[in-house]
Amino acid sequence: MPRSKQNKKTAPLDTDKIENAIRLLNEKKLTFHGASKHFQIPRTCLRRYHSYTLKEGISVAEIRKNLAVKRVFDDEQELMLANYFKDVAALQFCLTLKEVKKLAYQFAKVNQIKYSSRWHSEKMAGEYLLRLFGKRYLFTLSQT
């Protein structure tokens, strides 16, 4: 029976370790193999971060932000949406998942936020956005 990677989660990498490793790589004091062993960072990740810092010239913290899932809404906008959904729930007004996706699309359109062309054709947000939004704000939306 094949192994499942479903429940395996890796700890996020420490940005200080990555920055120190990249600094030592740039100073030619360590190789990729040596830096990955010393700082306990996967070699492929170290190579990716090193190439991004060389190309873009930005810090590792900025790279980590950009390598995250491309989010449509920033933290403030998501918090506004989450508070709205919680207020609506407190008023005993039940929103379906389809209505929540339509509200997210309308919110993005009104605030002139860049979103997927698929959202425009369907006039609603996608399932992926809804799932990740629910995970970030630790509430589940009823599937009615």
Image (cartoon, grey):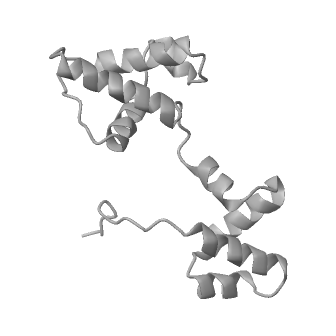
Q: Is residue 93 left or right of residue 72?
A: left
Q: Position of residue 61 (x, y in %)?
A: 64, 57
Q: Is residue 124 left or right of residue 58?
A: left
Residue 95 to residue 69: above or below: above
Q: Position of residue 139 (x, y in %)?
A: 25, 37
Q: Is residue 88 left or right of residue 83?
A: left
Quadrant in the rendering for residue 39: bottom right
Can you see residue 96?
no
Report the residue at 49% width, 28% height from top. 77
Quadrant (top left, top right, bottom left, bottom right) of the C terminus: top left
Quadrant (top left, top right, bottom left, bottom right) of the N terminus: bottom left
Report the residue at 73% width, 73% height from top. 22
Q: Position of residue 107 (x, y in %)?
A: 47, 16
Q: Position of residue 8 (x, y in %)?
A: 34, 66
Q: Is residue 37 left or right of residue 79?
A: right
Report the residue at 50% width, 13% height from top. 121
Question: Residue most toward the right?
Answer: 27
Can you see residue 80?
yes
Quadrant in the rendering for residue 5: bottom left
